[in-house]
């Protein structure tokens, strides 16, 4: 698995080898950051929820994000994330969280961490986890007023309604769909 753009473009990182975890394909990652636009991540605070291998956080950091926080409840995933950050000499001691999204959002709220962009890639069988995380992130005040949430899911699954954010756009790539949300005004 390789980083698709930015200062780490072409650098290899370790894929996750857990059957239930499906890392975002390079085509989907390239498309996502192309849709966001050049320089969009610059100086932004990123949340990579259901992080898996940490590839979305690494892609954002490669594109000049200020910081990227990874959250995953699986210890094997967290070990892969840590090793991938180490491969690129990026510290992750304070930005990698082995806990549930609910616990992490409570921590972020009490710590005053506010995200500009969040990536959500829960297991395809549980798309409601992403929308629950978006709603909880909004209600705990951890999303900036102009925040964007990007939800990757199977193209045959319509994302559940979100109380706090509106769907901005959707794009299909193979079996994956990217749904972009922004805050209701």
Image (cartoon, rainbow, N blue to C red):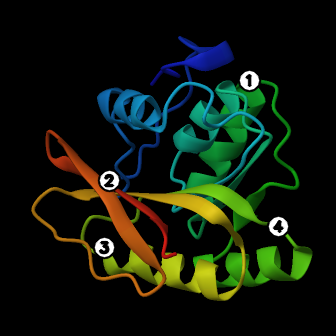
Q: Residue at x 27, y 64 (%)?
A: 124
| Residue occupied by mark 4 | 113
Q: CA distance from mark 3 to mark 1?
A: 31 Å
Task: Please tell me whether residue 64 is drawn above or below residue 171 in the rendered image.
Answer: above
Residue 120 can be seen, yes or no = no
| Residue occupied by mark 3 | 127
Q: Nearer the viewer, residue 127 or 15?
A: 127
Q: CA distance from mark 3 to mark 2?
A: 18 Å
Q: Residue furthest left?
A: 156
Relative image position of residue 148 (x, y in whole percent): 53, 57
Mark closest to the chain's N terminus, 3 or 2? 2
Judge left or right: residue 86 versus residue 11: right
Q: CA distance from mark 2 to mark 4?
A: 32 Å
Occupied quadrant, residue 87:
top right
| Residue occupied by mark 2 | 19
Mark closest to the chain's N terminus, 2 or 1? 2
Task: Please tell me whether residue 170 is drawn above or below residue 130 in the rendered image.
Answer: above
| Residue occupied by mark 1 | 88
Disc 2 or disc 4, which is closer to the eye? 4
Disc 1 or disc 4, which is closer to the eye? 4
Mark closest to the chain's N terminus, 1 or 4? 1
Marks 1 and 4 in Cβ contact (< 8 Å): no
Disc 2 or disc 1, which is closer to the eye? 1
Disc 3 or disc 4, which is closer to the eye? 4
* Helix, strand or loop at mark 2: loop
Q: CA distance from mark 2 to mark 1?
A: 25 Å
Q: CA distance from mark 3 to mark 4?
A: 25 Å
* Helix, strand or loop at mark 3: loop
């Amino acid at each position: 698995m390789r980083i698709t753009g930015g200062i780490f473009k072409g650098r290899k990182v370790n894929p996750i080898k857990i059957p239930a975890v499906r890392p975002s394909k390079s085509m989907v990652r390239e498309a996502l950051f192309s849709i966001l636009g050049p320089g969009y991540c610059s100086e932004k605070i990123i949340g990579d929820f259901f992080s898996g291998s940490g590839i979305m956080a690494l892609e954002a950091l490669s594109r000049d994000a200020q910081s990227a926080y990874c959250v995953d409840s699986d210890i094997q995933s967290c070990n892969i994330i840590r090793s991938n950050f180490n491969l690129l000499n990026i510290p992750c001691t304070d930005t990698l969280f082995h806990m549930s999204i609910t616990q992490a959002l409570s921590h972020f709220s009490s710590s005053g961490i506010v995200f500009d962009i969040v990536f959500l890639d829960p297991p395809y069988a549980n798309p409601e986890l992403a929308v629950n995380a978006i709603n909880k992130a909004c209600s705990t005040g951890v999303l900036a007023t102009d925040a964007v949430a990007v939800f990757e899911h199977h193209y045959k699954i319509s994302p559940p309604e979100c109380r706090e954010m509106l769907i901005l756009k959707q794009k299909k790539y193979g079996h994956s769909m990217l749904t972009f949300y922004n805050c209701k005004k």
